[in-house]
Amino acid sequence: MFSFNEIKKSLAASVWLMFLTFPILVIRVNTVENVVEWRWKNMVYAGAAAFIISFLANFLVKRKEAGNKNEKDKGNKETLFISQRLLNDKRFFFPALVVVTIFILSFPFLFSMYQTSIMSTALIYVMLGLGLNIVIGLAGLLDLGYVAFYAVGAYSYALLNHHFGITFWVALPIGGVLGAIFGIILGYPVLRLRGDYLAIVTLGFGEIIRLVLENWNAFSFGPSGISNIPRPDLFGIDLSLQANINFIYYILIGLVIFTIFVVNRLQNSRIGRAWIALREDEIACQAMGIDKAKTKLMAFALGATWAGMGGVVFAAKTTFINPASFTIWESVMILCIVVLGGMGSVIGVIVGAMVLILLPEYLRAFSEYRMLIFGTMLVTMMVFRPGGIIPDIRKKYTFEEKDK
Amino acid sequence: MDWEYLLDLFLGGLTRGSIYALIALGYTMVYGIIELINFAHGEIYMIGAFTALIVASVLGLMGMNHIVIIILASVIAIIYSAAYGFTVEKIAYKPLRQAPRLSALISAIGMSLFLQNYVLLAQTSNFLPFPSLIPDFDFWEPYAHILTSQELVILITTAVVMILLTFLIKFTRTGKAMRATAQDKVMAALVGIDVNRIISTTFVVGSATAAIGGVLIASHIGQINFYMGFIAGIKAFVAAVMGGIGSIPGAVLGSLVLGWTESFFTGYISSDYEDVFAFLFLVVILIFRPSGILGRSETQKV
Amino acid sequence: MKPILEVNQLTKFFGGLKALDKLDLDIREGEIVALIGPNGAGKTTFFNCITGIYTPTEGDVVISPPNKKTMRINGMKPNLVTKNGLARTFQNIRLFPNMTVLENVMIGRHSRLSSGIAGAVFRPKSTRREEENLINDSYEILKKIELAQFVNELAMNLPYGAQRRLEIARAMATEPFLLLLDEPAAGMNPMETKRLDDLIVKIRDTENISILLIEHDMKLVMSLSDRIFVMDYGKKIAQGTPDEIKSNPAVIKAYLGEETDA
Amino acid sequence: MMKNSFGRVLISIVLSVFMCLLISGSTFAADTIKLGVAGAHSGDLASYGIPSIKAAELVVKDINAKGGVLGKKVELLTEDDACKPEVATNTATKLVSQGVDVVLGHICSGATKAALGIYKDSKIICMSPSATNTDLTLSGDYPNFYRTIAYDDAQAQLQVKFATETLKVKSAAILHDKGDYGKGAAELAKKYAEQAGVDVKLFEGVTPGAVDYSAIVQKVKRAEVDAVIWGGYHPEASKIITLMKKERMETKFIGADGVKDDTFIKVAGKYAEGVYATGPMDVSQNPLAIAAKKAHQEAYGSDPGAFFDSAYAAALALLNAIEKAGSTDYDAVSKALKTEYVDTPLGKISFDENGDAIGIGFSVYQVENGAFKELK
């Protein structure tokens, strides 16, 4: 079944890769007694790896082109199918919901504290992802400065708590509101910009916020950050570490459900449709009587709200924040979540967050290789599923049953 | 008014600008042709520097003479960066031509992560001293306290590279083909341009420039590590956008503007908010010229 | 009786280039008016100036919707123009490709609805009713334009003719008193064109929406329009009933006998 | 349907929380002593974290060779935190869940602060080879924290004392890299410098990783100060000093332990000559240090990296304390750390009430013919 041609192709690939990786992989100058190490076996590995991979790749690409799905795709089809059911079909919906709920609720007791903790982190990113999804997935505005609002949220809790002893539960809505306000402030000047120009300017804003936090000690305590931020309180009962971690987990579950609920409703509302129209075609969108500026600002503001709340929870979870947590990479990660998951699709974003946040944690087994693998995963996933893991499905209307 | 200080800052900004330019050129070429923010470009530049270092130290241990080392190191670095650029495009971007543009962007990010850690693992996480390949010219000694020989070389090279690229794009057949492809891939293909070949060429050329940048910059600041590509890359991209992404002179102009902005702001106000100011400046420029200083403002057809 | 759309001395420069030159035009209620002229005569520019996509350099665009007060709309934002009852379609189809046919029409109703974010999230009775009506109204419109069978298709998967019709449906959803059609028949086969012809008449008669259309298909133009304006190089070179236009030397000159296919 | 699952979640939150209160921090019966090593093992600061793994590996190797601690083998659990607080909390939680007994790390002060909360609640001792932020020990917030490196305050005092008394510096420019380590140190230096009557003409941060620092160097040149006091790591330092020398400037350059790293000299080359830096007392004559370095070269074919010695010392101190305490019990071990002295590459050390190491002096070095030479 493998044509000679394929093998030749793979051979060529491996030779090319051996050439390519030669200086960096093979040669290393030993800094102690200045001699050159020639690590020829690395070259062999590289060659072999390249051969196998390119062989597989060709194979997969052939299949992909041939259109008949390989296992990976099948798997995704499956989830897609289920997700569709979950959304539409009541019969499948309730049993599924019950099972999922039970699993989610018992999670902290089934798994270790560590598992719960990283799951909470993942959930924070689910929130962020869903928020950014409003801006990018629905309104189609490429925002690379999203982390700015995250920072706003985190610092608003940390500072309010530090100065006025504001508690988590009060700070949560405040963080959201502040996020929204910043969303509008930052959104306003960039209304005219499109595509990558918007991207780079928002990226700029993100950096500006970070740098201000870094330099303006009087306000933000600078790079040494703010420590001993209290974890969320439960009617003043003080909880053990374990309990605390579980508590945060449940808070996040609550918030995520809330987010999903809101995003879902927005998606199929007048506003949501306006956003999508804006994404699809600005000119036509205006010609349909939609106020471009207002719609864009709404998207920015709403997106930022979730970032703000996420920030508050983040601060409460880590108990320490400093500007280093809010670099461009954070924005990039969140962007990856949205795109990888499938732009505009709620389940997609959730899956995306789970994959991108939990993957590096589980890749710890590979210790120093983890980021390498992570990078590779990003590329492969995009190459084989450009639309994201679970692409968006438009809502269907049938005319017997009315509004749902 | 302290004129010498002003001059110093001016030259400082000029050097910094030229450094950005050497990276920005590659960005802008790639973007111009496939509208992709090539996140991995900074990494290519880093790889260029590493290759040069490795080659140089190997030859050094073999006791070759200085000039030979310089030339060989640079040439090999350029070849390898070009090769990397070519491969990256084939692996990570070509399959995504038809896909949504963001997917390509994510793929680029993945590539950048991969290359960083590849070098980290295969070589070292430490900062490595980079031999100053460019000697201090004696004839330049009188002026060296204002502008070092290395800086001089950087300025000249940038100028030359820019001129060559402009020439390539404006007058050669390949250049014409590139512009055609940038305009409209389908049409270009219809008139018999091998679009894939042209895109590959763009990547090769872009990466080669990055390598030149890598070698020069590394020998200017005298150290490299696997992470050097990221920040430089971001800055260069900002510069490219500022100048009007897709335009060669724009990239250089943008880089210089950025360089001067930072230099003067640091010099007269404070380096604390240097970048803040740089970004604000970018925002202001884009608000008044939404497609950059020299960018052709796309009048959208209705 | 007062014209519902009155354009006086409309002029538009692009840099040095004069795209529109002192153009006068008027439409009375219930009319179907055609705007014709060779390619590059500035017809689409004219549309863009009226609908606010471009701001005219000089001149006035005045609308007086039936039983509403008269107002100047030049320089007004596109979305407000639409809100005030001018709807348009595009020469190069500009649907929302990844939305369903129904949603495309629902978008059209946007400016006629009120529910905001709060409404969307809390779904009070008012919003629910609004949505219900919206869905049904949009469905009704689709029925009228004979697209009902595609209701849940993605717009991009429609056959060409259907896409053109969907643009019209979407425009009608904005409840205009005047509908601006930019080459609605472009690229249609004779059968589709015939169908379009009937459709336009039907819209005018049943919805009493007046219509201004740019069109190259002379057969369609002549059979449809009550009056015709002819443009060339941004100037108006003739106006009148189909018969007057047919026999107008200036037009014949401009078209070099192109109108013989009428 | 959203509403009723809201309900469920609320109820279950309350329920579960009470369940959690019942389950107190579970204890692990282990047949090995688990030594956690946490810090930046990836990302841009990896070069400061990886040496501590190497140190730990070497220590554990020969301790196990000698029969381990309390007759048990020592097991290494290395976890990456990339110097990111948010990751650090997960790293810490993971180590705790794995039943770690003591932790060597973290590397960056920020990450350490984030992680300490978790170690504190689970009564685990944590010793950093490199986190110099003053609050870590002096604020008293972290009784479970120890370190084998002097905190910024001490260094800053020494720097300034040296600058004013030995170098007779009248005016200074204080630069930093905007990082938590660098800026913190710089601020303290500023404080003490002003107390000592030094005219601080410049206090500015530079962007780490920037391609060029000529502007700031020009500014320093113009300010005509006697000395530059640098708060930050060596990469930026070497770039700045190189430029200063190329600009033919004679201004003195004083760094802290972020600079006192052989890589600095390797990188800055001839330009490094004459640079001052404070750092842990010279240990190059200490037999243990020599042995450790040799072991490293044999094992990894390269010279040890930053904070290797202090990491090595920390690993020794921790394991020794467990040995002496006769158990891994929190109080016993803390007591042992504070009472028992132990031989390390840094000399004979113990720990004071705050958790700072006693016996690791600090001294000023100057680069002379390509090596840091201790100034008496």
Image (spheres, helix red, strand yellow):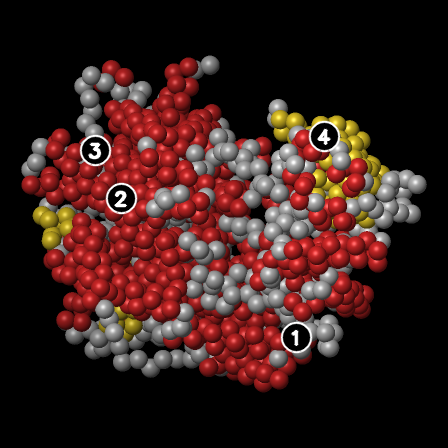
Residue C145 image offset from top left, x and y in percent: 73, 61
Q: What element carries label 1?
A: helix
Q: Which chain carries label 4?
A: C
Q: Is residue C118 visible?
A: no
Q: Residue C250 carries which label?
A: 4
Quadrant in the picture for the C terminus of chain A: bottom right
Regarding mark 4 in the picture, which secondary structure is present there? helix
> Any mark on residue B132, and which?
3
In the rendered structure, which amino acid carries the disc numbered 3? Ser
Residue D92 position (above or below residue B86): below
Between A200 and B297, the one nearer to me in the picture: B297
Q: Do marks 3 and 4 share a subunit? A: no
Are dots 2 and 1 on a single chain?
Answer: no
Q: Which amino acid does label 4 sit on?
A: Ala
Query: In the rendered image, which residue does mark 1 sit on?
Result: D2
What's the mark number on residue B82? 2
Q: Quadrant of residue A135?
A: bottom right
Mark 4 surroundings within 10 Å by alpha-carbon count, few (fewer than 14), some (14 through 19), many (20 or more): some
Judging depth in this view, the residue of D33 and D84 nearest the camera is D84
Q: Which of marks 4 and 1 is in front?
A: 4
Q: What residue type is labelled 2?
A: Ala
